[in-house]
Amino acid sequence: MSRFNVAADKAGEVCERFGWDRGWSAAGCYLHLEVSEFIEALRGKGDSTPLAEAADVLFVLLSTCKANGIDVDEVVAALDARCEGLLSGAEDEKYGKAPE
């Protein structure tokens, strides 16, 4: 089991213990909030660090994947494939050609 899936399992346990909803509606709100806080931390605003806020974003994303039966290793594989397609130029038709 990958480190991502271990983290997803642990984040899922935390949500279950505290009764935090990870259905699409609540999770969408939490994810939006945490991404906004991450961006603000990158801007030097707020009272948290980008590292802490990035961890919060991953917590919500991983726990939401876990709660909805999405295997995080498959998500990472899909990301890897997308990046390979973009780097190889195979995705140019879908995303446009990268600047030279």
Image (spheres, rainbow, N blue to C red):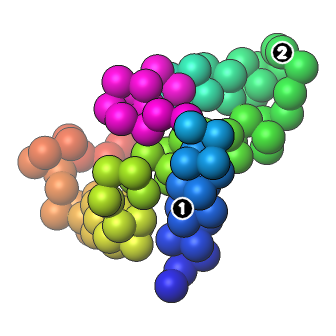
The label number, if any, that marks residue 46 in the structure image: 2
User: Is 80 drawn above or below residue 91 in the view shown?
Assistant: below
Q: Residue extending furthest left?
A: 93
Q: Quadrant of residue 24?
A: top left
The label number, if any, that marks residue 8 in the structure image: 1
Q: Residue extending furthest right?
A: 47
Q: Amino acid at mark 1?
A: Ala
Under circle 2, the secondary element is: loop
Please report the residue visible at 70 percent of the width from the left and 46 percent of the height from the top.
55
User: Is 89 drawn above or below residue 41 in the view shown?
Assistant: below
Q: Quadrant of residue 43?
A: top right
Please report the residue visible at 79 percent of the width from the left and 44 percent of the height from the top.
51
Under circle 1, the secondary element is: helix
Q: Quadrant of residue 66?
A: bottom left
Front-most of residues 96 and 7: 7
Coordinates of residue 86 in the picture (x, y in percent):
29, 58
Q: Is residue 89 left or right of residue 39?
A: left
User: Is 39 drawn above or below residue 100 in the view shown?
Assistant: above
For the record, the magenta segment spans: 20-30
First in sequence, mark 1 or 2: give its number.
1
Front-most of residues 61 and 41: 61
Q: Is residue 48 left or right of residue 69?
A: right
